[in-house]
Image (tube, rainbow, N blue to C red):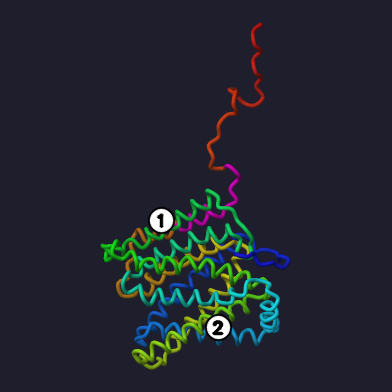
Amino acid sequence: MPQPSRPASRTSLPLLTGLLLAVATGLVIPLQGRINGALGAALDDGIAAAVVSFTTGLVLIAAIGLALPKGRAALRRILPALKERSFPRFYVLAGGIGALFVFAQSFTVGLLGVALFTVAAVTGQTLSGLLVDRLGIGPGGKRSITGVRILGSVLTIAAVVWAVSPRLGAAADVGSLLLPLLLPVVAGCLMSFQQAMNGTATVHYGSPIAATLVNFVAGAVILWIAWLIKVLLVGPGHALPAEWWYYLGGPMGCVFIGLAALLVRSLGVLVTGLGMIAGQLLGSLALDLVFPASGAVVALPTILGTVLTLFAIIVATLPWPKGAFASRRPASGSQAGPGSRTPAKGR
């Protein structure tokens, strides 16, 4: 994949600040999912719920972009950046990955259950985060695949499996679900690429507002086409509900996409993803405790798995000294400590 040219880098966010923002961004995801799920049930149409979410998000981010001077300046840079090929033009289709993720949820959650879907998507996102950083697709440049980063990724996947294990009982025959599992794995893999593409676009637009707007335009167009096809085949669902809170999913998506595009520049794709996964588990745990949904399970593995995820982020992000986890052996021929002298040979 061609490497886009990058303008001079600005000061990066401090590591701790970036991690806290990534975790806070992840907190939005389960709440957004709960709202969009409730909207889908009210409309009796999951695709229509996604259309509403993307469209409200698009309207909001467009209004913000037009209202703010910096937003207007960023919007004016979109077409010149594309004409100059400052980055690959297909990056504008990153919003289609979000649409694919919605499709994956609509078509497989009912079959797999939320737990298996979560494990599959997180596995794909974590593994592809390593690859995207190694290829240097994101704005932060190339980041090596070190043993510590691999360990943090493995711990994250294990933690998510542990956290959702109380809900895995219904999916006894996982072998028969292998093909349906591939869709959320692929969707999760592409999420890392989406964050890298949006992050790179943000650098050239000068603001995450423009990248978020382009993202919502692409996703909304794809979802509107899918919904219109569905209406032609089976007809529309129910009328839009009157309650205002059903329409908060789109604005929450603006927060998620905009902050993710900003954070990958400082943290890289992998660490940004791990932070959001931790926030997602923390948010899900809080929702299940405060506003439990039907079938919600809060057991000890859920809590311990969430804690393990936080530990995995620490492992993957701390500036461990080189060779910190390597076994140390004395130099060849050396048997005494520093400062000791080699005994003279007898004559």
The residue that appears at 70% across and 76% down in the rendered structure is 84
Q: Main secondary structure of the magenta part?
A: helix
x, y percent for residue 65: 63, 84
Q: Which residues are magenta?
A: 309-323
Q: Is residue 317 magenta?
A: yes
How many numbered discs? Answer: 2
Q: Is residue 304 left or right of residue 219?
A: left
Q: Is residue 167 magenta?
A: no
Mark carried by residue 158: 1
The residue that appears at 58% across and 57% down in the rendered structure is 134
Q: Are marks 2 and 1 in contact (CB under 8 Å)?
A: no
Q: Is residue 190 left or right of residue 297?
A: right
x, y percent for residue 38: 38, 82
Which is in the foreground here, disc 2 or disc 1?
A: 2
Q: Secondary structure at mark 1?
A: helix
Residue lying at the far right of the rendered structure: 8
Q: Secondary structure at mark 2?
A: helix
Q: Classify the position of the N terminus by image quarter.
A: bottom right
- Along the line of sight, the residue nearer the viewer: 30 or 122: 122
x, y percent for residue 210: 63, 79
Label 1, residues with CA under 10 Å away: few <14, some 14-19, many ≥20: some
Mark carried by residue 253: none
Q: Tag 1 or tag 2, which sits nearer the N-term? A: 1
Q: CA distance from mark 2 to mark 1?
A: 36 Å
Q: Is residue 90 above or below residue 19?
A: below
- Along the line of sight, the residue nearer the viewer: 208 or 290: 208
Q: Mark 2 is on which residue type?
A: Val
Q: Classify the position of the C terminus by image quarter.
A: top right
Q: Which residue is mark 2?
A: 217
